[in-house]
Image: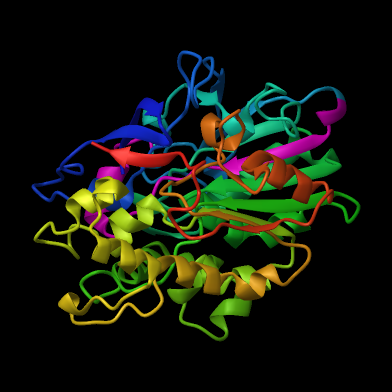
Amino acid sequence: MKLLWVLGFMGMVLCRRTDGYADVNGTKEEDLHYTESNVYGYGPNGYGVFSRPLMVGLTLINGAAAKGAVCLDGTLPGYHIHRGYGSGANSWLIQLEGGGWCDTIRNCVYRKKTRRGSSAYMEKQIPFAGILSNKAGENPDFYNWNRVKVRYCDGASFGGDSQNEAAQLYFRGQRIWEAAMADLMSKGMRYANQALLSGCSAGGVATVLHCDEFRAMFHGTTRVKCLSDAGLFLDVIDVSGRRTLRNMFRRVVSLQGAYKSLPWSCTNRLNPTLCFFPQHLIASVKTPLFLVNAAYDTWQIQASLASPTADPNGLWHECTKNHAHCAAWQMNFFQGLIPIVSFMFFNKSGFRNQMLKAVSGFSRASKNGLFINSCFAHCQTERQDTWFSQNSPHIGNKGIAKSVGNWYFDRVNIKAIDCPYPCDKSCHNLVFR
């Protein structure tokens, strides 16, 4: 889902979607399914926008190749790091980059010629905004920590361990994760007194997959927690009555050997494909975990619920681009208020209600935290306007940054679940052109 930041006003962030979706050999659906970009809220001062953020350079992990930890095309993996200082000198925030998945040889061959599959195409500098910002006024609890963004170039949420010699593809996500963590430990992270593993979207999935591994790297006295943003991908029936996302995850897990990285606590009772869905993992994660998710996640709406393959006649096209263009029956499909009989199946619970059901057991543990707002959004911790600003989204009187900080430092127990749409007037809803 290619997004370009344009302008924010009246509770919306206007974006341009590049149609068709990366026309690969004539097939116009792959970009929506397999790539995505973050929308950064910066520009002239005003609603939801800020001064240009800190730009941080790319560091390649030089020892990674010897461990077989390479991107899809065989190039070195990398990360961006900005050092902490003062009270945050021994605190570390690791953010795992998102960016969809590749589930076929053809898609992965295309991906290895992009920044999502090769460090040769990665930006040499990226902005650190939102949870990565170095300004106390934009990131009050983590601004002076050591902040790291680990680049995503494997296509399986840092979880694969295989290769395809004929196509010259290296599926080494698990090894990239291990090499990146080892490199950072050697650069001072082993002395951390506080650590937070975070990630957005596919990086949010990776955060759940690796959360307990991350905890095991540190001494027992180190405060270690995890934050998954927009990573709660649901195994739901789409508008055609099929399971688009389950089918894609099945191909990812099989092609890239990701089943090797999945927790045994899940695979001993469920099919490996189902264990790639965080909804089946979160209750068994032992490390404290916080979930930030939009109840009407725009990526899932566009790529899972009403993807082009599930909606070949385009009945959902305008609705998926802008929720204001959804007919009543379409909005009820998200809410679960009425059955959608025209598609020959019954949506009994609705997308939002299925999300709440998925977190019900997880939320009962006092160590865990939740912030599920009723917005049409995706990845809210990385954008400055949604993470922490005068007009950022909130539930009650708490925004996302304050909620995460309060939970991390054990100031307040946070289990924030919004009322159903359209009650929340603080949303920064994504609208696509």
How many numbered marks, from 0 up?
Answer: 0
Inspect this view and state whether residue 406 appears. yes
**Could you tell whether 260 is left or right of 321 in the image?**
right
Please identify the quadrant where the C terminus is shown: top left
Residue 89 in the magenta stretch? The answer is: yes
Percent x, y for residue 224? Answer: 78, 51
* Most foreground residue, 20 or 386: 386
Q: Tell me which residue sits at (41%, 32%) in the image.
A: 10
Q: Is residue 84 magenta?
A: no
- Percent position (x, y) of residue 114? 32, 36
Residue 45, percent from left and from top: 51, 14
Q: Quadrant of residue 300?
A: bottom left
Q: Position of residue 97 (x, y in %)?
A: 51, 42
- Horizontally, is 200 left or right of 429 in the view? right
Q: In percent of the image, x 50 and y 83: which residue is there?
A: 270
Res 316 quadrant in image: bottom left
Q: Compared with residue 117, is residue 90 higher up or lower down, i.e. above or below?
A: above
Of all residues, the one furthest to the bottom in this rendering is 269
Between 364 and 166, the one lying in front of the other is 364
Q: Is residue 113 above or below residue 301?
A: above
Q: Which residues are magenta?
A: 87-115
